[in-house]
Amino acid sequence: MSDEYALALSGDAQDLLFRTARTANSFADKPVTDEQIRAIYELVKWAPTSMNQQPLRIVLVRSPEAREKLITHLYDFNKQKTSAAPLTAILAADVNFHEELPRLFPHNPAIKDVFGDETMRVPVARFNAALQVGYFILGIRAAGLAAGPMSGFDQAGVNADFFPDGEHQVLAIVNIGEPGENPWFDRLPRLDYEDVVTTV
Amino acid sequence: MSDEYALALSGDAQDLLFRTARTANSFADKPVTDEQIRAIYELVKWAPTSMNQQPLRIVLVRSPEAREKLITHLYDFNKQKTSAAPLTAILAADVNFHEELPRLFPHNPAIKDVFGDETMRVPVARFNAALQVGYFILGIRAAGLAAGPMSGFDQAGVNADFFPDGEHQVLAIVNIGEPGENPWFDRLPRLDYEDVVTTV
């Protein structure tokens, strides 16, 4: 190990967030509280977005009616585990995030006007909200909970049912809770450093 | 504080990754080694992507020629700080990530064929690579380094110069190093929990 660079992050934290943390496919029958979600948000809100845009919006799906509606849009392999999860959140991009920029970027409130064109604004919203989806998944793990992020669902259906005004676009859906019985699939292989990183 | 939920992640780790970590705009004159980047990658590679796609690709821009070429594509406010950064990385999505799926998703190698349609595949690649950009930014911080992620550049120009075969699309550029003199701008406000999280 002597030729390896030691990270500043403790080994315990590396394990909690990355190494032993796993995508959960079953959850314990134990509620996830608003206080837990608040604690996660109050941590991950500090991670960076372009020009402090913060376009991620989170919908906690708690009522039986909303849960039922959401599950109709999931692909079959995601339905059962979501029905049994203590909490499911819809993660979406606010495509009108620029309306908030005068208070989020107060030294240059006119930056809002740069985003007047929707064809340019929507991809920017989706990219920055996707960064925040990544931060939020790690935040769930930071809370000692397991995340079960999913992309296997009908995006247009979720948007029509949950965001009918067109101002938000779903990016991912995530189950949240303590892991249940046999919660993990086998760990899948990762690309080697040499596959991913090149130098020019 | 008694009504707050305590995160499992230690306070030191919270600070290192989120609370005291900041986007750097100047860097110390100290190299960032390949060993450091490797250590970051070997940590963040474990964070999840949809169907284990792992579409992020990282180009370390080290040669003077490549650095000069990259800087021509940056918006003016990003040129000087990038010229002075010890290392700059281009973060891109591999839009042909599906070619790797037989080895990354070995229990169902035919999943590759789901992604035959490029108009469906490219947004999937960009979304999952954006998650990984978020993980990578936090990984830089986990290494005790500061990240300076940027979106202010000519994407088409970077793609033409660095990815002429069209198989990769740049998502972000990030400066990496130890913070230099006066490295931080004032911290910008974050949205309140109530602005971001709703319950249905």
Image (tube, coloured by chain):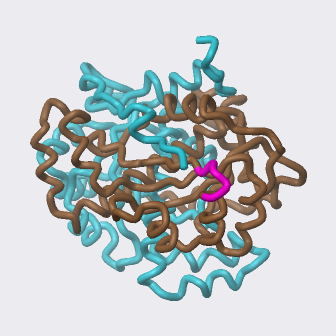
Chain colours: A cyan, B brown
Q: Quadrant of residue A111?
A: bottom right
The residue most toward the right is B181
The residue most toward the front is B65
Compared across the picture, whether B113 is left or right of A99 comes to left
Compared across the picture, whether B123 is left or right of A91 comes to left
For the residue pair A165 and B180, the one nearer the viewer reads as B180
Position of residue A124 measured from the top left corner of the image (x, y, whole percent): 49, 70
Position of residue A171 measured from the top left corner of the image (x, y, whole percent): 36, 59
- Name above or below for residue A20 compared with residue A110: above
Position of residue A29 measured from the top left corner of the image (x, y, whole percent): 32, 28
For the residue pair A102 and A80, the one nearer the viewer reads as A102
Residue in the picture at 37% in, 28% down: A22
Q: Do we see residue A132 in this rendering?
A: yes
- The quadrant of the rendering that contains the N terminus of chain B is top right
Residue in the picture at 57% in, 47% down: B60
Q: Is residue B62 on the magenta stretch? A: yes
Compared across the picture, whether B57 is left or right of B84 comes to left
Compared across the picture, whether B123 is left or right of B28 comes to left
Residue in the picture at 65% in, 26% down: A7
Position of residue A181 measured from the top left corner of the image (x, y, whole percent): 26, 20
Q: Quadrant of residue B19?
A: top right
Part of the protein shown in magenta:
B61-65
Q: Is residue A152 on the magenta stretch? A: no
Q: Do we see residue B200 in this rendering?
A: no
